[in-house]
Image: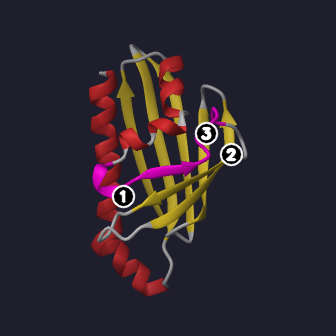
Amino acid sequence: MYQYISTQKLNISKDKAWEFLSNPKNLKDITPPYMGFNIISGHERKMYQGQIIQYILTPVLKIPFRWVTEITHVVEGEYFVDEQRFGPFVFWHHKHFIQSSENGVVMKDIVDYKLPFGVIGKLVHFLFIKKRVNQIFDFRKKKLERLFN
């Protein structure tokens, strides 16, 4: 099992941060273009517990695959959790926290994940996946910085 943690300060109100981050339609804007990210269903309504969101991604060699996540927990204005139901990981649990701070908010992401294929999965993580996860969240941080700071 692996864990990725990211913390970012944004100079916006907690309400504005929640409005943006909890809207599934905004996910494409904060995902690197090379991921070929497209939401195919589940983004029509405001985020709610039990919501199923389906995506198509083309992160490697333009080969499309489907990723399905469920919003398993929502505390309005505070945090939400998405978990993979179908996709490339054996386990994916992503917590999104928003806390008030001086002059804005602190956004914290905690992702716990596991790859399939045992030792081969560990090697692929070391050679590729860890770097890719970091790149995706670095892109997200920079995009949010441009949008809100």
Residue 43 in the figure: left or right of residue 131: right
- Image side of residue 137 versus residue 20, left or right: left
Q: Which residue is mark 3?
A: 80
State the residue lying farthest toward the right: 50
Please state the horizontal and vertical placement of residue 44, each as a whole percent of the image: 61, 37
Q: Is residue 11 left or right of residue 101?
A: left
Residues shaded magenta: 32-47
In the rendered structure, are the residues bearing label 3 and label 1 in contact, judged by CB atoms less than 8 Å apart?
no
Name the amino acid type tagged 2. Gln
Which label's residue is closer to the chain start, 1 or 2? Answer: 2
Q: Secondary structure at mark 2?
A: loop
Which of the 4 image quarters holds residue 124? bottom left
Residue 12 has which mark? none
Determine the CA span between mark 3 and mark 2.
11 Å
Residue 35 included in the magenta stretch of the image: yes
Q: Residue at x 29, y 71 (%)?
A: 61
* Residue for badge 2: 51
